[in-house]
Amino acid sequence: MNYQMAVPTLCLAASLLLVLPWRASAEVDPALQAYQQATAAFNAGNYGDAASSFRKAMELRPSWKIRYNIAQSEASLKHYDLALEEFEAYLIEGGDDITGDRQAEVMGEIKRLRMLVATVELAGAEQGEVFVNGIARGALPEASRIKTTAGKIEITIRKGNKTIITKVLRVTGGDTVRLDVNVGSDDAAATTAPQAATSSEGAPMPPPRPEVSVPPEPRISKSRAVGWTLAGLGAATLATGVVLGGVALSKASHVEDQCKDGHCPKSSEDEAKSSRGLALSADICFGVGAAMAIIGGLLGFGVFSKRETSKVAATPIEGGGMLVVTGSL
């Protein structure tokens, strides 16, 4: 048997068998599955399922890019308040990674949505979770300033399963309303605050045109995924080399025990040849495995990744007066 050819092949084959289970488990991606389900639901017009699945993908793999799709889904459901919050978060978190065209598009959608959304300021000493039209919007006192779609709304404050306060009022897009949420206060306590600037655009604009075009941000790039796969294969090859080396040393020790005063019995020649073949195979495995592990590690850590040129982006937060500048020169 030709060990110089057969055993190195066995070395590589064994390393492949060791790494395949790791590779198969790495390909299971619940975040991508959720994103694909959301995209299919959106394209079928099932915007509620789309929003839910996009949010699930966001939880599994946080990415500012998915906020764009959540916003479009919520806008299609006429949840303009939730869409506005997601679009604003998209601009802030995306910063200078958002292209100029997409940034201009989203800023235009934000401008139109603000005409369809009112702000409710909750005043009072009560604490509890706030619900607007049955949707949880945070807890007091942190959630004391809430955006809501214009029209008739119901604000409920709950502590556990107990409803503390329920208020019903009608709000107009672009307005800021202050609402007393103390126990025993009257619904008429809601007042509209004067606005620093009013819109001259007349009737509210239609909702944004639905479009799902932003893929989920990958956990690692393709080159980095290949790198970690290569590193895993290299580690498995090194492990195979260790096993082969151990067998070779054992055989060599046995041959040495049979030889006395420099004379070896003829029966030990085959075992000596086998030991040398295994040692050579172990050396090959060590060399190949080390090279694969080093190159894979460098790729996996993104040593060879290209960095994008940064730029400065100014993002509007509240209508009329405040900008957040992100990025670098």
Image: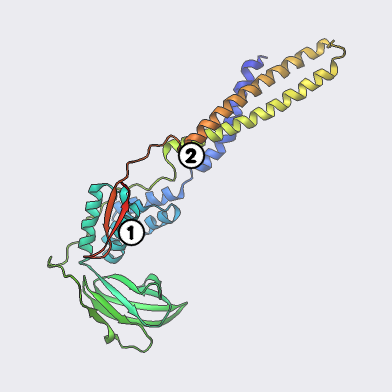
Query: Sequence-wise, which precedes: disc 1 or disc 2?
Result: 1
Q: Residues within 10 Å of mark 2 (few under 14, many from 20)?
A: some
Question: Residue at (36%, 89%) from the top-left corner?
Answer: 184
Q: Are marks 1 and 2 in contact (CB under 8 Å)?
A: no
Question: Residue at (66%, 19%) from the top-left corner?
Answer: 280
Q: What amino acid is at disc 1?
A: Ala
Which image quarter: residue 318?
Answer: bottom left
Measured Cα–Cα span from mark 1 to mark 2 = 29 Å
Q: Position of residue 314 (x, y in %)?
A: 26, 55
Question: Which of 243/325 is in front?
Answer: 325
Q: What amino acid is at disc 2?
A: Phe
Residue that carries the numbered disc 1 in the rendered image: 89
Q: Residues within 10 Å of mark 1 (few under 14, many from 20)?
A: some
Residue 244 located left or right of residue 99: right
Question: Which of 102/304 is in front?
Answer: 304
Q: Position of residue 150 (x, y in %)?
A: 24, 71
Please determine whether, in this image, residue 318 is positioned above or below residue 100.
Answer: below
Q: Which mark is residue 46?
A: none
Marks counted in the figure total 2
Question: Residue at (29%, 61%) from the top-left corner?
Answer: 83
Question: Which of 73/114 is in front?
Answer: 114
Q: Position of residue 179 (x, y in %)?
A: 30, 81
Residue that carries the numbered disc 2 in the rendered image: 301
Please determine whether, in this image, residue 70 is positioned above or below residue 233.
Answer: below
